[in-house]
Amino acid sequence: MEPLTSAVLLISGGMDSVALAYWKRPAAALIVNYGQKPFQRELDVSRYVCQDLKIPLYQQTVLPLPAARPVDSPEGHSSDWVPFRNQLLITLGASLSIQFGLEAVMIGTVQTDRKFADGSPSFLAAMMALLQTQEGQLRLLAPASSLSTLELFEISGTPREVFNGVYSCTYAEQPCQRCSSCVKYAEVMASLSERPKIGPIDDCK
Ligand SMILES: [Zn+2]
């Protein structure tokens, strides 16, 4: 299966990056362990998807980033907020792209990520400009940035059984059902007219 896109996809095993893998079939994928509790679950899903699509999966571990806040903070950040995460991931993906002679880094930002500073159009434009300042031809691709997750799923051709099996909780190895990622997963699955396949309530630390 030939890749469709000369890019390294930043994959997390969640709905958006998995759908992007099926839609754009990148030349390589990168998963980063930055200290997130569900990393093993994210890795398991990413491995499955990459094997299914014959995409080489690379893994990097970095020092744990300061923990995302478990509940909405007084500053108004959503519970998914991990300061500086996306620019770190983009930088690691860019480095890998250069190493492999690829043209781009691809990130699974969707429209609802605009509530995060690092999911906004201005952030994506700034990172694009930064990559090109350093390595002129390297691009940042965010092909789903104006789509909802549901629209992305529908356009992507992701098999339904794969989509049902993605892992989206930000905080725990069993879905907490309370963080904004779990809520989003449940909403998308409800929209797909299927009962959310998420586990029992666990600690949401
Ligand atoms: Zn959760």
Image: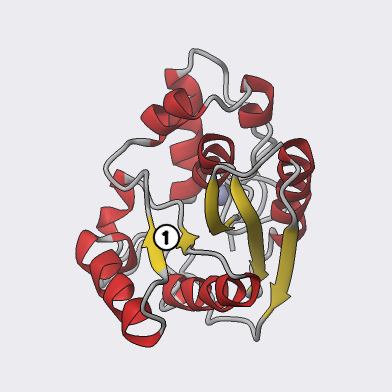
Residue at horizontal 69%, vertical 33%?
165
Which quadrant of the view contains residue 30?
Answer: bottom right
Q: Quadrant of the N terminus?
A: top right
Q: Is residue 118 above or below residue 28?
A: below
Secondary-structure class at tag 1: loop
Residue placed most toward the observer, 105 or 176: 105
List the single residue furthest toward the left: 122
* Quadrant occupied by the C terminus: bottom right
Camera-side residue: 190 or 159?
159
Mark 1 C-beta to ligand 1 under 8 Å: no
Q: How is the image coloured?
A: secondary structure
Position of 199 with respect to 48 (left or right) is: left
Query: In the drawing, does residue 201 fall left or right of residue 54?
Result: left
Q: Which residue lies under the disc numbered 1?
A: 79
Can residue 88 be seen in the rendering of this structure? yes
User: Mark 1 is on which residue type?
Assistant: Ser
Q: Pinpoint residue 133: horizontal percent, then vertical percent.
A: 31, 85
Residue 76 in sight from this viewpoint = no
Drawn side of residue 29 relative to residue 66, left or right: right
Q: Position of residue 58 (x, y in %)?
A: 73, 65
Residue 135 to residue 111: above or below: below
Q: Position of residue 142 (x, y in %)?
A: 37, 53
**Closer-to-camera residue (103/64):** 103
Q: Residue at 69% of width from left, 58% of height from top?
A: 38
